[in-house]
Amino acid sequence: MVTLDDAVPTASGLVHPGITTSSAQLAFVKQKVAARAEPWFGAFERARTSSFGSLSYTPRPVAWVGCGSGNSPDEGCTAEMNDAQAAYTHALLWAYTGDKRYAAKSIQILNAWSSTLQGHRFDTTTYKNGHLQAAWAGSVFPKAAEIIRHTGAGWASADVARFEAVLRNAFLPMVRDGWAGGGANWMMSMSEATINIGVFLDDRSVFDDGVSDWRATVPSTIYLSSDGAKPVLPPARAVKSTNLDAYWYNPTRYVDGLQGETCRDMDHVVMGLGATLQAAETAQIQGVDLFGEQQRRLTAAMEYNARYLNNPSASGWACPKPLKTIGTTVRHGWELGYAHYAGDRGVSLPQSRQYMQQFRTRAWTELHLNWQTLTHAVP
């Protein structure tokens, strides 16, 4: 039986469960799934019948994860991300059904990695994606672990302690305070991972570091005309005013909502924007209103980029080349931001809604953007 911990702050001031989904959110979706209400039930069924939701899923942990650009080489990179998503999928299925088999599978995956992983390799030649890989997996594993730990799933205290240690030793050093060589999606993914790890560890200083990184970095990833003629310079980077345009992939002009990678491709936009919004959701659960602090900037980015995903020939495109997508990641980062701004705050986001609804019947998980229709949909 799922027993949700009371949403009462610990001595650190942090609330559990409190990474991406709260006790109230888990209970709300559980009721919707039981009632077979859409879009939640359809999304639940896709999670349940996916490879990530299979009760025969087998984790494939490695001692050292080594990831090159584009996962070449792939030394445990795909395995780690698949296992993180599977652990989270099973944690959600446990929370929504009370079927202990799902909890046991999530625990098996978490324990497999905590008993094996030593770290993530990084250098500037072979293992260029080390920080990003640690950020993605370091965002998703804590989401799974937080649900399992605080819903009466029966995770042994010694195993919890070992998982805490692997987060602190194999993930946190790679993501805390970011990395000077990363672009918008790297930086926001690292801030999300730091926030999530801080919550799971019940460590206020780590959580606060992640929030500080978020606050410092978001203004440099999305342009508003109030910033001036050019975007805000990224904090602690080699980017200067002389190479800022190149860092933004040389837009023809700067317009409200342009994101640092809009002129690169939309998948990387959504990787960064999705991490930004997910981190804000966790902070919101913890009583920190990052959504409110950057509402104008974040909603402008959602609407501007969704407009051209809906209609690539729409007027006002600010990039020298046509809109580009490189995969399916672009579909997965919209529900959570829409739920907060449109659902909770009543902000009109017609472009975001139009684009998001195209893919509700194909709700899925990819990298660090996981099952948002299931966890955060609003009608």
Image (cartoon, rainbow, N blue to C red):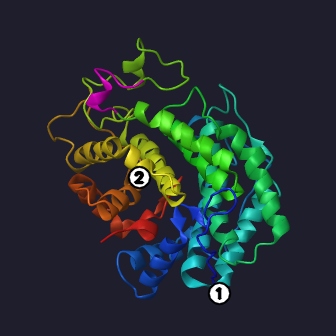
**Residue sitting nearer the eye, 296 or 320:** 296
Q: Tell which residue pokes out farthest to the top in this image.
A: 242
Q: Secondary structure at mark 1?
A: loop
Distance CA(mark 2)–CA(mark 1): 36 Å
Q: Tell which residue pokes out farthest to the right in this image.
A: 158
Let me know if residue 79 is in the magenta part: no
| x 64%, y 56%: residue | 199
* Label 1: few (<14), some (14–19) or many (≥20) C-alpha neighbours in 10 Å: few
Q: Amino acid at mark 1?
A: Met
Q: Amino acid at mark 2?
A: Thr
**Is 161 drawn above or below residue 232 in the view shown?**
below
Residue 78 visible? The answer is no
Quarter of the picture containing the N terminus is bottom right
Q: Splitting the image into 4 quarters, where does residue 261 fall?
A: top left
| x 27%, y 54%: residue | 352
Q: Tell which residue pokes out farthest to the left in this image.
A: 315
Q: Which range of residues does the magenta coloring cover?
A: 223-232
Assign the magenta stretch its main secondary structure.
Answer: loop
**Is 288 drawn above or below residue 294 in the view shown?**
below
**Is 329 drawn above or below residue 68 in the view shown?**
below
Residue of label 2: 328
Q: In front of the other: label 2 or label 1?
A: 1
Residue 234 picture location, percent across and down: 47, 26
Residue of label 1: 1
| x 49%, y 31%: residue | 183
**Residue sitting nearer the eye, 351 or 343:** 343
Q: Are discs 2 and 1 less than 8 Å apart at CB?
A: no
Residue 259 picture location, percent across and down: 36, 36
Residue 190 picture location, percent across and down: 58, 41
**Residue sitting nearer the eye, 125 or 232:** 232
